[in-house]
Structure formats: C-alpha cells, structure tokens
Image (spheres, coloured by chain):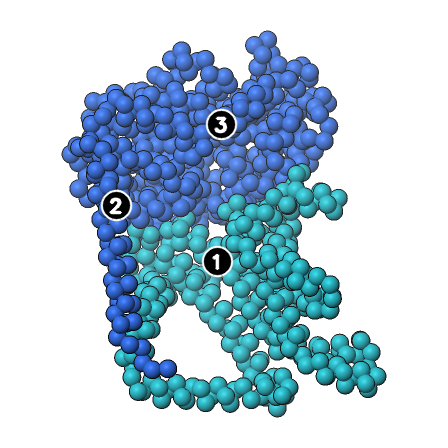
C-alpha cells in the first residue's frame, strides 16, 4: 500500500475541523437560546432536588409565580436527590457557576461552608416580600443561622410519623371518639397497643414497619427517641461529648424488642405491607401521598411519646443562595422574591405531606382541611434534630457513621449496650475531626447561632 | 502445525514484528504520529493528567471546592492505614473476589464443555450463556434486585425460600455474587469455548486409538490444554472483581448495604471524596488501591513467566 494521499488527509482534517466548529456553534447556541427564550430581563436559575409528587407540586407553585411575575424568568432544574446534589452544588459554587437559588436540607448547611459556598440572605429584602422571622418556629429559623447570619430559609419540615390503619385499629378498639389512635405515653402502653393490633390483623403480615435494616430511617428514629429521653449530643461549645450511653441503650433496646417480640418481619417492604393491611408503619411524611393515593382509611401521628415527652425527627428543605462572586442587584432580589413567594404559598406543598415552615399557612382553612396533615401538624413544636455541627444533616457523615451501627443493634448482630458505646466512640472521633472544607473542628467552627 | 507448536513460535514472531515496527517508525514519525495524536491528546487529558493530579492531591488536604489545599505529606496515607473502615471495605472487595473467581472459572468451563459437546441447537446455547454479558451493569443489577426482593421476588418463590437476600448482612454479598455470576460468566465462557475449539481433533483420535476413555481424554488432553486460558480467566476475573462497585451500589439502592456489609473499597473511596468532601484523603486511598491492583497483576505475570519457564 502506498502513502495515503493528500486528499484523504485533507478530508480528515476538514471533518475534524467541522466537528470542532459545530460543537462550538452549539455551545454558542445554547447560551444564546436561554436569553432568547423569554423576553424577561431578570433570570433566576433555581436548582432543586424535588422529583415525583414533590416535583409536580413545586412546578405548579413555580408556574403560579411565573404567571404573577412575567418580568422574572425562572429557570428551574431538578437534580437527583442525595449526595450527588450536594456535590454538584458545591462544585458549582466553587467554580463560580452557581445558580441564583438552590434548595438544601437545613442540617447540611453548617457543613457547607456558609460564607464561602453559600451567601447569606438579606432579611430586609425577605421582609419586603412578606417573610419574617416572627412567622417561623424560632428553633427552626435558628437552624439556618450561622455566625449571626441567615443562610437557609426553611420551606418546610419533614418529619417521621407513625402511620396507622383505622380499619384495623377499630377492630382492636384502639381508636378514640375522635376516630384517631388513642394516645400512648409509655413503652408498656405501646407494646400493649401492638399486641392488641396483632390479635386482629391479617395473618402473614408484620404488625409494624420499622425499616429495621435501613440505616437512614433507623438513625432518624434513634434521634427522635433519644431526644424524647432528653439525651444530649455535645456541650454548647462543641468541645465535649455528652452522649448518654444509658439513654441510648434504652432506645436501642426499645427498637430491638419490636423484632424479638415478632412485631416486625425484617426486610419486608414496609409501605407495601401497610397498604396490604399491616396495622402500623413508621415512615417519613412523604408517604402521605402514597397512602392517600391507595385510598386507605388511615391516620398519622408524630412518633409516639413512649418515653414521656413528644419529639419526632424533623429535617427541613430550605432555600439557599449558592455563592456567586457578583451576587446582588435585580437577579438577587428576584431570587429573594421567588423564595419568599414559594414559602408563603405553600398549601400546595403541604399536599406532599410536608409541614410548611411559614406558620401562617398552618392556620389557613385550606390547610386545616388536609387529612391526615392536620393530625400531625403539632410535630412543628416538637422537633428532634441532629446537633448543629458540620458533620450532621440528611445523608451526611454523622448519619452515615451512626446509622449502620443502630441497624446492627436492631437486627441483633450486636448488643444494644455495646452499640451505644460504639456510637459514643464515633461521636468522639467526629467531634475531634476537622471539617475538610475549612480545616476546622466543630468546636472551632463557629457553626453555632 | 499443532497449537502447542504455534504458541512456542508466537513470541519469536512477535519479536520480529516489533523490530520491523521500530524500523518503520524511524522512517517517519510525523506520519504515524499525527494519527496517534488525537488519541494521545485525550489519553493525556483524561488518564495521565488525572492520575498525576491524583498522586499530588493525595499529599494534600484538598476538599471538593478545590481551593486552599495544604501540603500534608504522608498524613493521608498514615490515616488510611489506621482506618478500620478502609480495611473492612477492602475485606469486602477481597471476599467478593474470592467467591466470584473460582465460581466463574468452574462454571464458565462447564458451560463451555456443554456448549461444545451438545450437537443440536449449538447457537442457542452459546447465545443463552453469553447474552447476559451484553447487558449494562445497571440493567442486570436492577433485574436481580427485583428477583431478590423479599416477599415478591421470583428467586425465593422459585426455590421456596424466605431469605432476606438484600437486607441481611449475611446474605447481601452472596446476592451480589450470584448476580455477578449470571451477568459475567458469558465472557469467560466464550474464552473457554474458543480454547476448546482450538484443541486439534487428532489428539483425541490418537488417544482413542490408544484406548483412552472419555474420562482419560478429559484429564490428559482437555484440562492440560486449558491451562493457559484458565490463568487468563482467573487473572481477568480477579482484577475485575477487586474493582467491585456498580452492581453492588445499584442492588443496594446506593447504600453501603445492610450494616455496611457490601461497601467495597471503591465505594468507600467515593464516599470519602463525595460525601465527606475529603478529596485528598480519597486520592490517597485510590493510590493505595492502585498499588494493590498492580501487585495482583504483577503476581500474575510472574507466575505465568515461571510456569512458562517450567514447561520449557
């Protein structure tokens, strides 16, 4: 074979050149198209993590906002929930390509380098659009405050609930005159309720769904009941671990008893079992649309105060302002306006089961009509939360380290007392470890309001 | 010419080929160089540079935001070697490898024998055994996740079991092993089938004339002829299995499995980098893993060379 002739080489070069030119052209087209798509002068890019029913509710609220504010162009992007979302948000903020508005779990804010990856809210601007601290649960509002500045504006809280089948409980005589589950105030009473429910329930199903081998749920339940016992995590300065292993053991033994007494089938799909007739399941409030969609006769209360005090685990979706070096002006104000609008028009959001954080919503007639939301709205006043440290938050390092340990106790592969010790060891190690974002420990972190 | 003769001749021929290529390259680098350039550019950009950058990052406390990284010397390595969670994760990857490699090797050989000897519908057997390998890992893992789901899964139903495959720490890894067997055995099967077809028929003929029965022919002809390919299958499988990640993550819904029982080394590295945002530490762990993988590959090469020298 001879040497390839010049023509072929030219052809190759031309093809390569064309490809490059075309991709550049498309890139240019991409940026141009955004600007051309609407005549609005102010563009708010908004990243959220809501899919499914939540996604549909959010889009409806955005559409309502668009209709009322034709001068603001809202470009929303829905990213997948979980760690990838936080990674993308962090890298976008670090690379100065951040959107004007984002959503995070409030527990993650302390570890998200507020001040460097997040910009603070302008409370005067928020007030201009109708959002004031006075309209929020103070403890919830303060979770978004770091070093005296507001970094997270709560949209909702989402809580762990005890779902129950009214049709089954009625047979066991466990419903009060108001048609709701009779209140339970001790572990003995609770197991008594389970026993009665089991005697009338459909055979072959579990009595209660506990997510016994899910590290996230087990961790959330632990936080709830440990708080009911008045357990503490660290001292106020975050220099000392105050984790009470006796209280922790009590909680872990309480979980384990559900398994040893046979109320739980480990690994059984909790939602399906409940829909098929299992009397109880502990789930996040996001299961409300699922169970309502299945047209079940059910109710939902905050997790039962078996240790004598109301407290259920609560996390919160909150609006944040990802760091932009030139943040300010009309786009920043539009971001404030959009966030305030969604917070103050959140009845639709409540349909997804979440409790709107803007409290005036909770006393509207529209919200009061929502079943079973009106039954667990009190959870707003009894929130059990993770400590406010950089390693906390939804699917964060704390949950990732401690969740599997709780599971090992509930599933019986480790003794509750020794698991409580292990938890304390993890907490001690975490408290001493440095936040990779700024090289400071929780004590040095200043992440306290 | 026999196959064994071919393998002896092959290295010599390869040497000649290399020599010719070198001469050719001297004639005109420009010509060949331009053809390689596009690949080389991408290779440097997406493989060489990240690798070097990873080595550098492993000596720093870099985080995900990419700024203010300090040089910390060997701190990351020191911490990793004392990190029980890392050793646990390495243990899970090793356990998986120890289960998968022998199973796949034996199963692939048996399936190849079956497909080789069955007269009718040969193509169908080959297709059936090989086709799962063509599925993307996520599809295969998702299918098996459903098959293993307690209460509604076909697997338990078929065998009359109630095993909590995906939710109990004693079964979770086994579930992943079973899925991996089904999914990847086709590749080794194909290697074995090709090797079986490469055995010259006259060897069997001669053995038959000498009165060897089927068992003897298997032991004294087939198995010895499979030695090289078995070494290859084991090495390839071991290297692939140590890098366990995608099927485990998909089957466990992106969690590290019940009580962390299926958290592989790769997954733990990912968590350190993208949950804990410790890019420097994650880089150090990647380098440690790279050394382990390289050691396995080297061990295999040394073994092979010794064996070849032994046969000479």
Q: Which residue is mark 2?
A: A30
Q: Spatial distance from mark 1 to mark 2, Cα to Cα?
A: 36 Å
- Identify the secondary structure beneath mark 2: helix
Per the rendering, the colour in which chain B appears is: cyan
Counting from the top left corner in percent of width and height, residue B45 is at 32, 65
Q: Could you say which is closer to the camera, residue B210 or residue A74?
A: B210
* Quadrant of the frame with the C terminus of chain A: top left
Give the residue at x 53% y 59%. Answer: B244
Give the residue at x 37% y 82%. Answer: A1
Residue under disc 1 on the same chain as residue under disc 2: no
Q: Nearer the viewer, mark 1 or mark 2?
A: 2
Q: Which residue is mark 3?
A: A285
All told, the count of numbered labels is: 3
Per the rendering, the colour in which chain A appears is: blue
Q: Could you say which is closer to the camera, residue A20 or residue A428?
A: A20
- Please, which chain is the residue tagged with disc 1 on? B
Q: Earlier in the sequence, mark 3 or mark 2?
A: 2
Give the answer, above or below, for where A199 lies relative to B231. above
Counting from the top left corner in percent of width and height, residue B17 is at 44, 86
- Identify the secondary structure beneath mark 3: helix
Q: Spatial distance from mark 1 to mark 3, Cα to Cα?
A: 34 Å
> Residue B154's image quarter?
top right
Q: Is residue A152 visible?
A: yes
Q: Is residue B173 visible?
A: no
Residue under disc 3 on the same chain as residue under disc 2: yes
Q: Which residue is mark 1?
A: B266
Q: Spatial distance from mark 3 to mark 2, Cα to Cα?
A: 39 Å
Counting from the top left corner in percent of width and height, residue A340 is at 28, 25
Give the residue at x 71% y 80%. Answer: B201
């Amino acid at each position: 074979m001879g040497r390839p002739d010049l023509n072929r080489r030219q052809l190759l070069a031309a093809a390569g050149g064309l490809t490059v030119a075309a991709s550049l052209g498309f890139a240019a087209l991409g940026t141009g198209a955004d600007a051309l798509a609407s005549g609005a002068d102010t563009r708010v890019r908004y990243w959220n993590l809501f899919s499914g029913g939540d996604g549909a509710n959010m889009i409806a609220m955005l559409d309502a906002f668009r209709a009322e504010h034709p001068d603001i162009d809202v470009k929303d992007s829905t990213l997948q929930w979980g760690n990838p979302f936080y990674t993308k948000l962090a890298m976008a903020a670090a690379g100065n390509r951040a959107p004007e508005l984002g959503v995070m779990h409030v527990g993650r804010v302390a570890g998200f380098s507020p001040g460097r990856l997040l910009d603070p809210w302008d409370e005067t601007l928020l007030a201009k659009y109708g959002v004031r601290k006075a309209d929020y649960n103070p403890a919830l509002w303060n979770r978004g405050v770091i070093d005296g500045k507001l970094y997270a504006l709560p949209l909702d809280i989402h809580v762990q609930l005890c779902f129950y089948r009214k049709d089954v409980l009625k047979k066991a005589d466990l419903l009060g005159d108001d048609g709701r589950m009779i209140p339970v105030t001790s572990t003995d009473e609770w197991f008594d309720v389970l026993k009665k429910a089991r005697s009338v329930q459909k055979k072959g199903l579990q009595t209660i769904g506990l997510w016994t081998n899910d590290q996230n749920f087990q961790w959330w339940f632990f936080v709830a009941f440990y708080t009911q016992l008045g357990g503490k995590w660290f001292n106020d300065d975050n220099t000392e671990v105050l984790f009470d292993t006796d209280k922790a053991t009590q909680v872990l033994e309480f979980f384990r008893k559900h398994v040893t007494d046979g109320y739980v089938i480990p690994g059984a799909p909790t939602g399906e079992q409940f829909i098929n007739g299992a009397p109880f399941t502990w789930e996040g409030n996001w299961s409300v649309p699922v169970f309502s969609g299945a047209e079940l006769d059910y109710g939902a209360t905050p997790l039962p105060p078996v240790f004598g005090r109301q407290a259920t685990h609560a996390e919160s979706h909150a609006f944040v302002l990802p760091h932009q070096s030139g943040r300010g002006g009309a786009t920043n104000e539009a971001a404030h306006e959009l966030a305030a609008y969604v917070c103050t028009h959140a009845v639709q959001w409540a349909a997804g089961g979440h409790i709107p954080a803007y409290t005036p919503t909770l006393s509207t007639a529209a919200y009061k009509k929502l079943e079973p939301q009106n039954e667990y709205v009190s959870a707003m006043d009894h929130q059990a939360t993770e400590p406010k440290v950089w390693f906390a938050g939804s699917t964060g390092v704390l949950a990732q380290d401690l969740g599997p340990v709780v599971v090992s106790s509930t599933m019986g592969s480790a003794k509750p007392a020794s698991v409580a010790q292990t938890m304390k060891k993890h907490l001690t190690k975490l408290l001493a470890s440095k936040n990779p974002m700024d090289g400071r420990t929780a004590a040095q972190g200043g992440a306290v309001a | 010419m026999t196959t064994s003769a071919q393998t002896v001749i092959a290295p010599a021929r390869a040497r000649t080929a290399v020599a010719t290529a070198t001469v050719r390259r001297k004639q005109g680098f420009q010509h060949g160089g331009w053809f390689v350039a596009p690949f080389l550019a991408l290779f440097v950009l997406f493989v060489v540079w990240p690798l070097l950058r990873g080595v550098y990052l492993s000596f720093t406390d870099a985080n995900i935001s990419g700024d203010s990284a300090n040089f910390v010397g060997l701190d990351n390595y020191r911490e990793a070697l004392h990190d029980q969670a890392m050793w646990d994760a390495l243990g899970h990857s090793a356990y998986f490898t120890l289960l998968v490699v022998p199973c796949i090797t034996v199963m692939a050989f048996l399936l190849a024998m079956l497909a080789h000897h069955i007269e009718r519908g040969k193509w169908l057997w080959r297709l059936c055994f090989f086709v799962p390998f063509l599925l993307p890992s996520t599809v295969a893992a998702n299918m098996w996740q459903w098959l293993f789901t307690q209460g509604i899964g076909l697997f338990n139903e078929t065998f009359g079991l109630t095993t909590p495959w995906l939710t109990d720490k004693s079964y979770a890894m086994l579930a992943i092993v079973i899925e991996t067997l089904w999914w990847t055995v086709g590749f080794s099967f194909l290697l074995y089938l090709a090797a079986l077809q490469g055995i010259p028929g006259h060897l069997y003929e001669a053995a038959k004339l000498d009165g060897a029965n089927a068992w003897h022919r298997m032991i004294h002809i087939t198995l010895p002829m499979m030695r090289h390919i078995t070494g290859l299958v084991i090495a390839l499988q071991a290297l692939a299995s140590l890098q366990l990640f995608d099927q485990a993550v998909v089957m466990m819904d992106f969690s590290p499995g019940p009580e962390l029982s299926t958290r592989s080394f790769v997954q733990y590295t990912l968590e350190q980098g993208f949950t804990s945002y410790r890019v420097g530490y994650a880089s150090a762990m990647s380098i440690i893993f790279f050394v382990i993988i390289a050691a396995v590959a080297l061990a295999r090469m040394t073994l092979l060379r010794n064996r070849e020298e032994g046969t000479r």
